[in-house]
Image: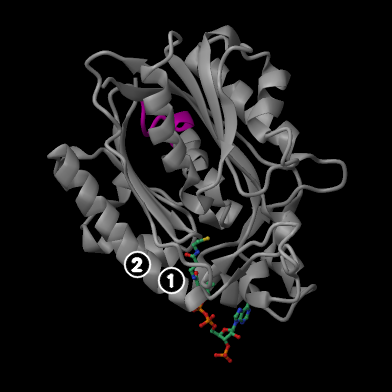
Amino acid sequence: MNGIKIRGTGRDVPKKLVTNRDLEKMVDTSDEWITARTGIQTRHHCGEGERISAVTAEAAHRALEDAGVSPEEIGACIVATVTPETLVPSAACTIQRALGLPRDIPCFDLNAACTGFLFALHTMECLLNASPRKFGLVVGAENLSRVINWADRGTCILFGDGAGAAVVECREGWPSVSAVLGCHGNDELLRLPGPEAGEPSYVSMEGTRVFKFAVEAVPWCVDQVLKKTGRTVEDVDFFVFHQANARIIDLAVRKYHIPPEKTYKNIAEYGNTSAASIPLVLSELREQGKIGPGSRVLAVGFGGGLTWGGCLIEFA
Ligand code: COA
C-alpha cells in the first residue's frame, strides 16, 4: 500500500471572539480559573449570520490553494465532525458543491469525536490507494458553540468553533501515516446525544475522568506510533497534540522531554475545537514556517467515544 503526505493546509474560524471575561458575565466562573485549569483565554463562536459550512469551505479552499491543487484533482473528501450544519447533505457534500469537486468521488462525514481528523487521514490513505486521482481533502470542522450547555460551567467554557483542512497526496513508495486508532465504547464519560435521543442535544462530560483517560491515552499513542514506524522521539520534527487542555499537553511534553521548539499550543486562542483542533495547529505551523516539505509530525488525538489515535505525518 502507498502512503500519503500533506501537501497543503488551510484554516478558518468564525469572527466572533468570546473571551473568558465575556464568560464571567454569563456563568459563575473566572478568567483565572479557566486560564489555570485549561489554558484557554478566548474561543471563536459562530455569531449572527455566520455558518460553519462557509467556514469549512473556506478552510478547504485555502488548503487547495496552499497545495497548488485544483478541485478537479481531488479523489475523495472527508470531513471529520460531530456538529455538521446539516446531517444530510453531509458537510463533505456541501464542500463538494461549494468548491466544485468532481462528482465521481466519495465525499462523506466521519465521526470519531476529537480524534476524527486522524481517523479521516487513515481512511483517506486507504481510499486514495484505490482511486485514479491521487489527491484527497481531509477536513476537521466543528460548530460546538451550538451544542454547549450554558448551565454547566464545567464544559461551557471549553469549546470553540472552527475548521482546519489538509490536502494530501498519495504516491508509490511514500510511507504510510501508520495510524494507531482505537475506541473504548464508553457512553458515560463524554456524550452528545443526537436529535432523536430523547435528551437535550448538549455536550456533557465527566471532566476529571476524561482527563485521566487522556493522560494515559496520549503516551500510549506516542509509544505505539514510534514502535510501528521504528522511529524515536528524536526522529520527529514536531509533536502535535489535540488541544483539549494545556495541562494534558504539558504532561506529555514533560514525559518525552520534548524541546519547546518541537511542540505547539493554540488552545489559548481557540479552546477545544474537537476534530478541527489538530488541522488548525498544522495549518498555523505551516504558515509560520515551523513545518514544511520533509517535516515529520507525530500527531495524537483523543476524545469522546472514547476514541484515541496517533499518526506519523510527513509533509510533501
Ligand atoms: N469556573 C470555576 N469553577 C469551576 C468551573 C468553572 N468554569 N468548572 C468547574 N469548576 C469547579 C467545580 O465545580 C469544582 O468545584 P468544587 O471543588 O467546589 O466541587 C472545581 O472547580 C474542580 O472541578 P473539576 O471538574 O474537578 O476541575 P478539573 O480540574 O478536572 O478541570 C476540566 C475541569 C474540564 C478543565 C478538566 O477536567 C479537563 O480538561 N478534562 C479533560 C477534557 C478533555 O480532555 N476532553 C477531551 C475530549 S473533548
Q: Against 9, is 130 above or below? A: above
**88 in magenta:** no
Left or right position of 13 against 272: right
Q: Amino acid at mark 2?
A: Val
Left or right position of 1 against 208: left
Instruction: Name the disc covering residue 211, or none.
Output: 1
Q: Residues within 10 Å of mark 2 (few under 14, many from 20)?
A: some
Secondary-structure class at tag 2: helix
Tell me if I can see residue 121 in this picture: yes
Q: Nearer the viewer, residue 267 or 229?
A: 229
* Residue range highlighted in magenta: 285-292
Q: Against 260, is 255 above or below? A: below
Quadrant where the C terminus is found in the figure? top left
CB at disc 1 and ligand 1 closer than 8 Å: yes
Do the residues under discs 1 and 2 have CB atoms within 8 angstroms? yes
Quadrant for residue 140, please give it: top right
User: Residue 158's spot in the image, x, y percent?
Assistant: 61, 64
State the residue position of label 2: 215
